[in-house]
Image: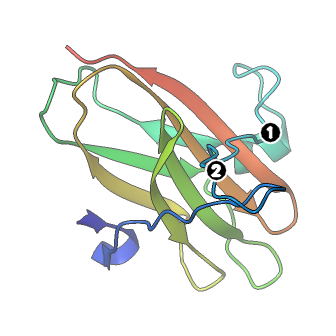
Amino acid sequence: MLVGVAGLALAPLARAPFACAQERAVPRPPSIEGREPVDAMALTREERRHVPVLVLPRAVRAGRPFDFVAQIGVEPHVMTEAHYIEWIELYLDAERVFSAELGARVAYPIVRVPLALVETAHLTVRSQCNLHGIWRTRRPVPVT
């Protein structure tokens, strides 16, 4: 069981088959594209409010659970009726392992996800702003 915003229990994601032109199911990895900052050391104003910020422990041990936190924006993104984060997704390599729908009624675009890894993985967090599109941050997570 995953725990999402405000401690609500979230159901695991169901995988839906995709159909190709021949009408047969062919599994395809999801797209994990999104905008990234040009220079992580000199963020623009727009990047400071939209780039997912990842909080990870210094060391991750194989099989040992840890809390992963993602906040949208170095300065947390505003959440108003006119401008808000629609959703946040978490991928380990190409597999989506967490998704949360947000909206203007969520005070802060921050999620906490308990994870346990058995081997090194690439972690990608994507979020969608209703005005500025999809943003992402990718980090390798070494496991000892």
Give the residue pinned by disc 2.
26
Using residue 22 as the reference point, say whether residue 119 is left or right of it: left
Up-down: is 68 above or below 22?
A: above
Tell me the residue at 40%/71% (across/down).
5
Find residue 47 and report its horizontal and vertical position in percent. 78, 41
Find residue 136 and report its horizontal and vertical position in percent. 67, 41
Find residue 126 and report its horizontal and vertical position in percent. 63, 48
Closest to the observer, 96 or 53: 96
Up-down: is 54 above or below 60?
A: below
**Numbered circle sitting on residue 129:** none
Q: Find residue 79 and report its image quarter.
A: bottom right
Give the residue pinned by disc 1.
35
Find residue 89 and report its horizontal and vertical position in percent. 55, 55
**What amino acid is found at the position of numbered circle 2 in the picture?**
Val
Up-down: is 80 above or below 131?
A: below
Tell me the residue at 76%/85% (across/down).
81
Quadrant where the C terminus sits is top left
Color style of the picture? rainbow
Closest to the observer, 74 or 104: 104
Tell me the residue at 83%/42% (across/down).
45
Instruction: Assess whether mark 1 and mark 2 are in contact (beta carbons under 8 angstroms).
Output: no
Q: Earlier in the sequence, mark 2 or mark 1?
A: 2
